[in-house]
Image: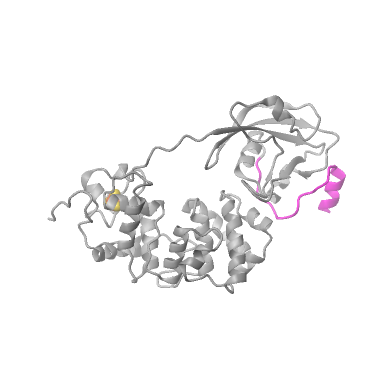
């Protein structure tokens, strides 16, 4: 029986044994994910690039559902780089955080134009590409180029904080965790080490109720041995998010079409389609002021309840006002059964669901820009 390691000391297993146990477990338990190369096969750079962008803020379960459709639409880096941004945003629906879609598109263009269509090998060149930060650069280096680096995402942070019982709260603990990750880097199967660590965090060393009995590191794990696994990694209490409020206008035309608008090309939810609305304001909601932004002078009816959506830096609460018009203003009109042609952010989907409209999947086509039903029929013909 091994002696207990002092708190904060390195794991009781040497690095080589830790890696051997991890890789043996990975070879037996790895999930068959559509972006993962078969065992023994090299990873495809474009497949890895798309999947890393998608996985940045979306769970593997959701990416697993969306990834094949996206790849069928943009099967190569050139296809993605040559596509209009609007098509890429549309294909990104369901994944959220649309800034990633814009960055991925810009990244593909930069690789096409500045690197002859090949993913750069050097870290500085990777970091210079749109949307690629330290984590993604490391992940691509390990998975695509077999470089001995260990990327540290939330899953890896959790596993290593527990294995080495690092009790300093995040984000202060990050330096110590990255140092532990660097110590695990190896030139033997670096891509598999990176993916095995992520896999272990995602499937076994879960945030709640870690499945320690299934873990290849059960024996050397400091947190398990001392019964503190579930409490690690510790986190500094999050700052409370400010609440912003706004009014959205659901204006229906005689044929049932709804008025939308396209958001500006820069900033939050850039280029996506939404219901017209007032600016989102901090503090108490001023209804009279918000109504000044109505897209038509008609009788507006306030709907019961608010729609709440949490962005990374604030919480949004939107009230809906509804009206019909016989004199539709010029604008971007779309019939409820054709909403699949728009790139709708999640908050707009929530607003539509609030009134019983379910935006279904659709085809890519420009929405009508006319105010009258007659023009709409012309556009469809
Ligand atoms: Fe996580 Fe448990 Fe494995 Fe430790 S033994 S790394 S807490 S799953």
Quarter of the figure with residue 346: top right
Residue drawn 80% across the image and 48% down it: 369
Q: Position of residue 224 (x, y in %)?
A: 24, 47
Where's residue 150, x and y in %?
A: 37, 62
The answer to whether residue 137 is above or below residue 342 is below
Q: Quadrant of residue 330?
A: top right
Residue 225 part of the magenta-drawn span: no
- Residue 267 in percent (x, y) is at 63, 47
Name the residue furthest bottom: 116
Split into 4 quadrants, where in the image is the N terminus? bottom left
Magenta residues, as a range?
358-381
Residue occupying the point 86% across, 35% down: 327
Colour scheme shown: one colour
Foreground residue among 59 and 188: 188
Main SS class of the magenta portion in the image: loop
Q: Is residue 249 left or right of residue 163?
A: right
Q: Residue at x 84, y 48 (%)?
A: 377
Residue at 26% over, 43% down: 228
The answer to whether one can see residue 37 in this image is: no
The quadrant in which the C terminus is found is bottom right
Left/right placement of residue 345 relative to residue 28 reads: right
């Amino acid at each position: 029986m091994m002696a207990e390691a002092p708190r904060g000391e390195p794991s009781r297993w040497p690095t080589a044994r830790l890696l051997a146990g991890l890789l043996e477990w990975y070879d037996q338990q790895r999930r068959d994910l559509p972006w993962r190369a078969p065992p023994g096969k090299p990873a495809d750079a474009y497949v890895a690039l798309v999947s890393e962008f998608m996985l940045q803020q979306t769970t593997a379960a959701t990416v697993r559902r969306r990834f094949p459709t996206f790849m069928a639409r943009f099967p190569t880096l050139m296809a993605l780089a040559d596509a209009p941004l609007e098509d890429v945003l549309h294909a990104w629906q369901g994944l959220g955080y649309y800034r990633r879609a814009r960055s991925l598109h810009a990244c593909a263009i930069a690789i096409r134009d500045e690197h002859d269509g090949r993913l750069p090998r050097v870290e500085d060149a990777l970091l210079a590409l749109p949307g690629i930060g330290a984590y993604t650069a490391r992940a691509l280096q390990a998975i695509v180029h077999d470089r001995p680096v260990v990327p540290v995402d939330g899953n890896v942070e959790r596993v290593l904080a527990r294995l080495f019982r690092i009790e300093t709260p995040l984000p202060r603990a990050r330096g110590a965790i990255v140092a532990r990750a660097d110590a695990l880097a190896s030139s033997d199967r670096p891509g598999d080490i990176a993916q095995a660590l992520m896999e272990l965090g995602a499937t076994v060393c879960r945030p709640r109720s870690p499945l320690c009995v299934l873990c290849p590191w059960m024996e050397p794990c400091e947190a398990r041995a001392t019964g503190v696994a579930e409490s690690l990694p510790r986190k500094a209490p999050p700052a409370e998010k400010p609440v912003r409020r706004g009014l959205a206008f659901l204006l229906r035309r005689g044929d049932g079409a709804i008025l939308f608008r396209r958001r500006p090309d820069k900033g939050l939810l850039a280029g996506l389609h939404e219901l017209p609305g007032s600016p989102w304001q901090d503090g108490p909601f001023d209804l009279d002021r918000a109504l000044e932004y109505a897209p038509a002078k008609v009788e507006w009816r306030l709907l019961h309840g608010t729609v709440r959506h949490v962005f990374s830096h604030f919480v949004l609460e939107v009230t809906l006002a509804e009206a019909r018009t016989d004199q539709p203003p010029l604008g971007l009109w779309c019939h409820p059964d054709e909403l699949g042609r728009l790139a709708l952010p999640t908050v707009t989907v929530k607003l539509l669901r609030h009134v019983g409209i379910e935006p279904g999947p659709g085809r890519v086509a420009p929405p009508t820009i006319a105010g009258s039903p007659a023009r709409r029929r012309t556009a469809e013909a």
